[in-house]
Image (cartoon, helix red, strand yellow):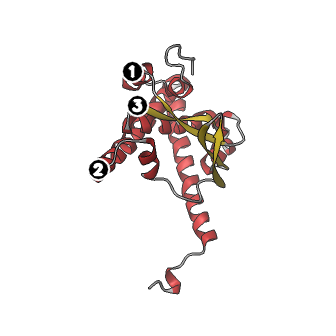
């Protein structure tokens, strides 16, 4: 039986999670901005992207291991089921939407993007978001979760959806320096300069 001392009001729990997400956003910017300051914009961003790829590897491989141990297929649904993100406090609200016949997840008020904007570091902060396509492709290279909208890009909310990967996407993921912007935009055949 739960005692009164063990219960935490939802508002306090939301605040605690938001504070943790805020610190995570600050940590990402501190590391990324230090790399840029010490090594220059291009090299600093490249190393930040490599760090996010390593982070995504850790996430994707752990989810894959859990799924395999559970006897689950490596599907989009099971990737979502294995979410390792807080159910509340990271965003002001989340909702599911159907756009052009496809399912999308919309997240409003991302705590980390607020921090990046506060520090004038939307571009460096946005690199963190590439953990989504990277971790899904590591979980299963046949699909990726991409942002169709992202607050650090100037959108009012983040919108994510799953899509199939191309052979070019898979090859791009294997490169030492991966262009996740091209993977996310589906432009790996003719990558845009980041």
Mark 1 vs mark 3, foreground winner is 3
Closest to the observer, 11 or 117? 11
Rendered-image quadrant of the C terminus: top right
Q: Percent position (x, y) of residue 162?
A: 52, 36
Closest to the observer, 128 or 70? 70
Identify the residue position indicated by label 3 in the image. 142
Rendered-image quadrant of the N terminus: bottom left
How far apart are the two marked residues, 2 and 1, measured between alpha carbons?
A: 28 Å
User: What residue do we see at 47% from left, 31% from top?
Assistant: 49
How far apart are the two marked residues, 1 and 3, measured between alpha carbons?
A: 12 Å
Could you say which quadrant of the image residue 50 lies in? top left
- Label 2's element? loop
Identify the residue position indicated by label 2 in the image. 71
Residue 121 visible in this rendered orientation of the protein? no
Mark 3 Cα shell of 10 Å, populated few (<14), some (14-19), many (≥20): some
Identify the residue position indicated by label 1 in the image. 171
User: What residue do we see at 40% from left, 24% from top?
Assistant: 170
Could you say which quadrant of the image residue 12 lies in? bottom right
User: What residue do we see at 49% from left, 19% from top?
Assistant: 188
- Label 3's element? loop
Q: Percent position (x, y) of residue 173?
A: 40, 26
How far apart are the two marked residues, 3 and 2, measured between alpha carbons?
A: 19 Å
User: What residue do we see at 49% from left, 39% from top?
Assistant: 132
Q: Are marks 3 and 2 in contact (CB under 8 Å)?
A: no
Could you say which quadrant of the image residue 146 lies in? top right
Residue 22 visible in this rendered orientation of the protein? yes
């Amino acid at each position: 039986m739960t005692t009164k001392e063990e219960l935490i009001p939802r508002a306090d729990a939301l605040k605690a999670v938001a504070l943790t997400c805020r610190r995570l956003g600050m940590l990402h910017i501190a590391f990324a901005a230090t790399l840029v300051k010490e090594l220059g914009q291009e090299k600093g961003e490249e190393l930040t992207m490599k760090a996010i790829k390593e982070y995504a590897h850790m996430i994707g491989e752990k989810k894959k291991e859990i799924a395999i141990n559970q006897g689950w297929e490596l599907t989009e649904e099971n990737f979502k089921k294995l979410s390792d993100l807080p159910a509340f406090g990271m965003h002001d609200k989340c909702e599911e939407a159907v756009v052009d016949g496809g399912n999308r997840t919309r997240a409003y008020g991302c705590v980390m993007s607020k921090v990046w904007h506060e520090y004038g570091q939307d571009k460096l902060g946005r690199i963190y978001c590439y953990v989504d396509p990277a971790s899904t492709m590591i979980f299963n290279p046949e699909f990726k979760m991409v942002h169709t909208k992202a607050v650090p890009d100037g959108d009012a909310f983040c919108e994510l959806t799953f899509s199939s990967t191309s052979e070019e996407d898979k090859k791009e993921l294997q490169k030492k320096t991966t262009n996740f912007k091209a993977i996310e935009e589906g432009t790996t055949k003719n990558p845009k300069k980041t």
